[in-house]
Image (spheres, grey):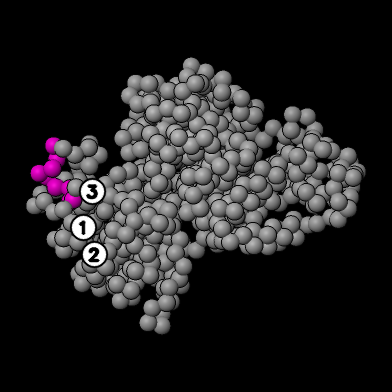
Amino acid sequence: MMNGGDFVDNKSAVAGGVEDVYGEDVATMEQPVTPWTVSVASGYTLIRDPRHNKGLAFTEKERDAHYLRGLLPPAVLSQELQEKRMMHNLRQYEVPLQRYMAMMDLQERNERLFYKLLIDNVEELLPVVYTPTVGEACQKYGSIFRRPQGLYISLKEKGKILEVLKNWPERSVQVIVVTDGERILGLGDLGCQGMGIPVGKLSLYTALGGVRPSACLPITIDVGTNNEKLLNDEFYTGLRQRRATGQEYDELLHEFMSAVKQNYGEKVLIQFEDFANHNAFELLARYSSSHLVFNDDIQGTASVVLAGLIAALKLLGGTLADHRFLFLGAGEAGTGIAELIALEMSKRTGNPIEENRKKIWLVDSKGLIVESRKQSLQHFKKPWAHEHEPVTKLVDAVKAIKPTVLIGTSGVGKQFTKEVVEAMASINEKPLIMALSNPTSQAECTAEEAYTWSEGRAIFASGSPFDPFEYNGKVFVPGQANNAYIFPGFGLGLITSGAIRVHDDMLLAASEALASQVTEEHFEKGLIYPPFTSIRKISANIAAKVAAKAYELGLASHLPQPKDLVKYAESCMYNPGYRSYL
């Protein structure tokens, strides 16, 4: 039973703890289930329902029992054979956007096969459903639009947002990913077309973190766009007006946050995604004490980068506090990463966070952030203004600060020039260079450039994937500091523990859990992140550490605490294998 907004089913540990009304997830894989929609789905409706459709995998008995005779060709194919055929078809496409569209079509047609493909072929398909291809998909969303996915809440719905939420067919929602489309990856304001980001992120919550698809809700808040190209595009799917700001914007967001809590309860996770800097920090600060909120651009990015840094210490030597960090970019990602590094240093050394911040320097569009600029800085940049003479060029900042680690979060490509990388290599035996901006076109430098300009000495990681590169007979495998390592497992940990708030210590726990998954074998290849092939195991370990921290901090509501949190997390994960409908 559900009590007062409590969506945790205490009798079931399956599917992330949400009450399983129809027993579909409580049943073992051998037990038959009933394909409920509003009523029992059968015949034509069944093969048009993506959650229950199995295509040619319906058995002879199922075809008789559910009135499917004649509606399908006579052949019966296994899910494995369907997967093989689909992968063969996808590989025929030379254009990544065509693969993306084929995957979205599959998700709308056969949900379980979509997730089976994604889980079994994660390294090949992750760049298709997520960065970098999702960026192009958002840019062209109006042209490729077929069926609406998720919920659209625009200024037209002001005063009626609770009613709009009730239009969504699922009641037991556990994770909402929401964007207002103002800062999509490094591509800028894409307005309503930013919906590709929440849809893509939630696909990964299911595939990589095992959160049930029906528990995921993508939302785009449309307050207009300042992108003139979209406003003049006849195929644009959003409001044709300039962005609402100030009180009008704040009131809409406040109504949204209140309606979500009223409709789905205290423990629904709201992940803010690709909001512009000024709104991202404000929303996180305003709602973190009253809602279960998480900003992937600030906190997820910070956690995955910190994990890479902790792992890299095995190659670099010393502790975090022994190193100096220089960031290009002082927005959500840059300041979020910097703050988490400083927090981790405090945890390890016991030193005040203010002292640790002095080892971390940031460069923005006007140059090195220094004390003399403090009056003109945005509030989130002020903690990083240290005593130093003004420096405008990045290469001069590298020479002056002498960092051991260079991190790019600028959203502007080609900023780590030959001169910059050579300066890092002249200062350090093993310079750690992280070019994190997405998509690939916006990366501060490529893997090839980092390895070549450092004469094969750099330890390199990027936000979007790069192919392995051979230099002087040695093959280097670039690491990918992809948020997808963190947020699915992090979200699963919050859900399985019934957490009511996010705490910074949970982010540190997630970073340490990810870093612990990097083995000696990975280090030998120059990797500071584990391969994505074992991502579900990684997510279960992250979920366990996050849940343990939630219990330790008294923020967990799912009691009693399971004895083995890793096994418990694994048992909660969605399995995309077909079910028997007899």
Q: How far apart in space, not on screen, are marks 1 and 2 (Cα)?
A: 7 Å
Above or below, comparing residue 385 to residue 41 in the picture? below
The numbered mark, 3 or 1, whose residue comes first in the sequence reads: 3
Query: What is the distance, in whole Å, between disc 2 and disc 3 at their CAs?
Result: 16 Å
Q: Left or right: where does residue 373 sit relative to residue 563?
A: left
Write the residue at 55% across / 27% down.
264
The answer to whether the residues at label 2 and label 3 have Cβ atoms under 8 Å apart is: no
Q: Is 473 on the left or on the right of 321, as rendered? A: right
Q: Which residue is mark 1?
A: 394
Residue in front for this viewpoint, 432 or 412: 412
Few, some or many residues within 10 Å of mark 2 (<14, 14–19, 20+): many
Residue 78: image location, x then y, percent: 78, 57
Q: Earlier in the sequence, mark 2 or mark 3?
A: 3
Mark 3 neighbour density, 10 Å: few (under 14) some (14–19) many (20 or more): some
- Residue, disc 2: 420
Could you tell me how far apart the alpha carbons at marks 3 and 1 are, in whole angstroms?
9 Å
Residue 209 image offset from top left, x and y in percent: 55, 49
* Label 2 residue SS: helix
Q: Quadrant of the N terminus?
A: top right
Could you tell me the amino acid type at mark 2?
Val
Q: What's the residue at 25%, 39% (across, down)?
A: 380
Q: Kindly identify which residue carries mark 3.
A: 364
Residue 500 position, x and y percent, is: 46, 33
